[in-house]
Image (spheres, rainbow, N blue to C red):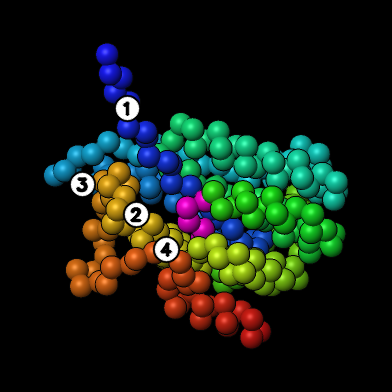
Amino acid sequence: MTEVSKPSAPAPLRIAIVGAESTGKTTLARELAVALAEGPSQRLDAPRPAARVALVPEFLREWCVAHGRTPRPDEQAAILAEQHARIDAASAAHDIVVADTTALMTHVYSELLFGDRSLIDTAIAQHRTMAATLLTALDLPWVPDPAVRDGEHVRRPVDDLLRALLLQHRLPFAVVSGRGPARLAQALAALRPAMGAGRSRRSALFSTLTAGAPADARPVRRWLCECCDPAAERAVARARSR
């Protein structure tokens, strides 16, 4: 008897939200997860199965609250590993995973705060497992959070190092700016190419995203852009000129 193998299930879409502190990463991650989960239900004329969406919160915040302090240099590697262990676990049971930070952020803070670059190779390798990366712009006001934040002065150095690493290692990313609904709308627009041609499952799941694109829009062949909306870069430029 010939054994017929079943087609393998498509890999989940893993979306990373990265950025300096107080740039709306957690809010955007929550809103994006809700929007992606609700998207298909809006097409009542062509019902499709709802996407199974997981939101993976920032483990660092949980760690800091539990310990009442920020981590030491020797504790960074375990935090990095746990963040991605949770992303992997969520990926095993969901179609889409929205991660509020990745190993890349752990490395950035290790390098900037402690001068420690020992996590760079692991951080880059882990981040490569993400299908798309959204980098939150510096256009939101800084809000203090004693549990995890170091101060407004670190936002620009963090943003600079993040951009440098993403570009140096050719990790696809898009800058997201704006406030409230505009920030979420920009994130959804930036993700359209990741749901594009050649990904039938994702095209079905995210029909509401592609439906919002102009009819004469040029097809995007790959998801690789420093900024999918020039307005985001203008916002960053204004912030840097202050």
Name the residue at 26% across, 61% down.
212
Closer to us: 60 or 172: 172
Q: Which residue is mark 3?
A: 43
Q: Tag 4's secondary structure? A: loop
Using the numbered discs, state the Cα–Cα distance from disc 3 to disc 2 in whole angstroms. Answer: 17 Å
Amino acid type at image mark 1: Lys
Q: Nearer the viewer, mark 1 or mark 3?
A: 1
2 and 1 marks in contact (CB < 8 Å): no
> What is the magenta range?
130-134
Marks 4 and 2, the one that precedes in the sequence:
2
Q: Nearer the viewer, mark 3 or mark 2?
A: 2
- Rate crowding at label 3 as few (under 14), some (14 to 19) or many (20 or more) other CA atoms within 10 Å: few
- Report whether 195 appears left or right of 125: left
Marks 4 and 3, the one that precedes in the sequence:
3
Is 133 within the magenta? yes
Q: Tag 1's secondary structure? A: loop
4 and 1 marks in contact (CB < 8 Å): no
Q: Tag 2's secondary structure? A: helix
In the drawing, what numbered circle is on residue 195? 2
Residue 44: name its quadrant: top left
- Rate crowding at label 2 as few (under 14), some (14 to 19) or many (20 or more) other CA atoms within 10 Å: many
Residue 55: x and y in percent read 51, 42
- Report whether 156 appears left or right of 92: right
Residue 36: x and y in percent read 38, 47
Q: Nearer the viewer, mark 2 or mark 1?
A: 1
Residue 105: name its quadrant: bottom right
Name the residue at 73% across, 43% down.
79
Q: Which residue is mark 1?
A: 6
Amino acid type at image mark 3: Arg
Q: Which residue is mark 4?
A: 223
